[in-house]
Amino acid sequence: MKISKALFIFGLILLVLGIILVVASPSLVTWKQKEEPIEKTFSLLSRWKSQEKSDILANDELITVKPYYSEWSGKWSSTYGYWFCSFPWIYGEAKNIVISWNAKEISNPSKIFNFYVFDEKNFDLWTEGYPSTPYYVGKGSNTYNFSLTFNKKEELPSSFYYVVEVPSTELNSSASEEALKCAVEVNVIARWTEVEERSKYDYADYCAFYYYSGLSERRNFVLEGNVAEQNNKNFNFYIMDSSNEGNFWSDKPYSAYYEKKGISSDSFSLSLTEAQLKNDVYFIVENPNTNVNETIVLKVKLTYEETDYSASEGALIFGGILAVLGLIVVIAAGIATIIFKKQ
């Protein structure tokens, strides 16, 4: 009887302890720190693409000058000849525009001449005898080689007027027409670098963070990291949701969680809600430089706390086992008591 009573008490203790552990198991749930890292390297082209181009503005253009002396007036006429060429046809933006000129007298023997290059306005002033500003003036030679440089196409005139003039020192009223004649061959070539804006997908890129919610409860979301250009060049950096990311690529108004422009490196830390994360997060880098390619490295991680049920589950399982064992022992003690009474 004493053994049966002891077993009953022991089983009852196990049963009570098991029940206590089962009831207390929800309170043993803890929060565990977790993180999800992202790392990506972006290779961005310059905002503009360049292409070397050229155009022939004058090809072996022949200007013949035949000075004439009037015995009646005692004056010379037709001492110069001219022609013009249009500026090169440039479709996009342009830089480093160089107009190369070659003018040579082709008589045998070759004769000296003066050579001028004007825009239309200054050519008209020169022909009327008014002060003028030529692009180029060359005197007393039988050949000229030179270049005119313009920084952008807006600086170009609509036309170049070039003039061949017989110098006053070569005018001899007793010379024959053939001796006075001056024949000059002119060649003009334009060379430039044409620049055109690339597609936005060439000078900007993105990395998407897709958030997947789990069964456990989560809280305290923090998005932190750093971004840097490998050669300390400037770039633009944005963090935004999916709808605003679409607006960014479409050049529409957008709203960003985070935005920095003209930086070479940056560190950031953002507190976001789970609802914001479920709308996905986009990291966008943009190269604002017109002629420099870039390499940008992004390192970021999402940290948060997540419920940890391991201790609670352990307590629930162990408490259940104790309760079952206690119940079995209590039942066994009861059966033993009944058996002992019959004896």
Image (spheres, grey):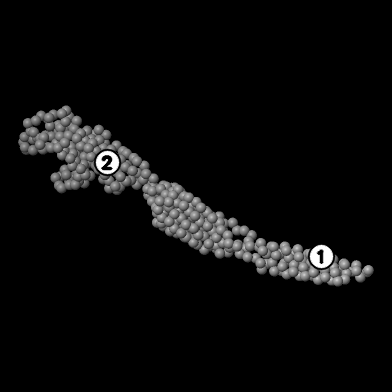
| Relative side of 243 to 183, left or right | right
Picture layout, residue 165 above or below residue 232 = above
Picture layout, residue 88 above or below residue 290 = above
**Which amino acid type is marked by label 1?**
Ile
Q: Which mark is residue 99?
A: 2
**Which amino acid type is marked by label 2?**
Ile
Considering only order in the chain, which callout, 1 or 2, is on the residue closer to the N terminus?
2
Label 1 sits on residue: 328
| Relative side of 86 to 271, left or right | left
Picture layout, residue 59 above or below residue 281 = above
Give the position of the N terminus as an image quadrant.
bottom right
Q: Could you tell me which secondary element the residue under label 1 belongs to?
A: helix
Task: Mark 2: give few (<14), some (14-19) or many (20+) Cα within 10 Å.
Answer: many
**Badge 2 vs badge 1, beta-carbon distance below 8 Å:** no
Instruction: Name the residue located 46 percent from the left edge and 55 percent from the top edge.
Output: 227
Instruction: Name the residue located 72 percent from the left edge and 67 percent from the top edge.
Output: 22
Instruction: Name the residue located 10 percent from the left edge and 38 percent from the top edge.
Output: 168
Q: Which residue is at the front of the view, 86 or 53?
A: 53
Give the position of the C terminus as an image quadrant.
bottom right
Q: Which mark is residue 142?
A: none
Relative image position of residue 276 (x, y in whole percent): 54, 61
Q: Is residue 244 at least partly visible in the picture? A: no
Relative image position of residue 296 (x, y in whole percent): 45, 51
Q: Residue furthest front?
A: 2
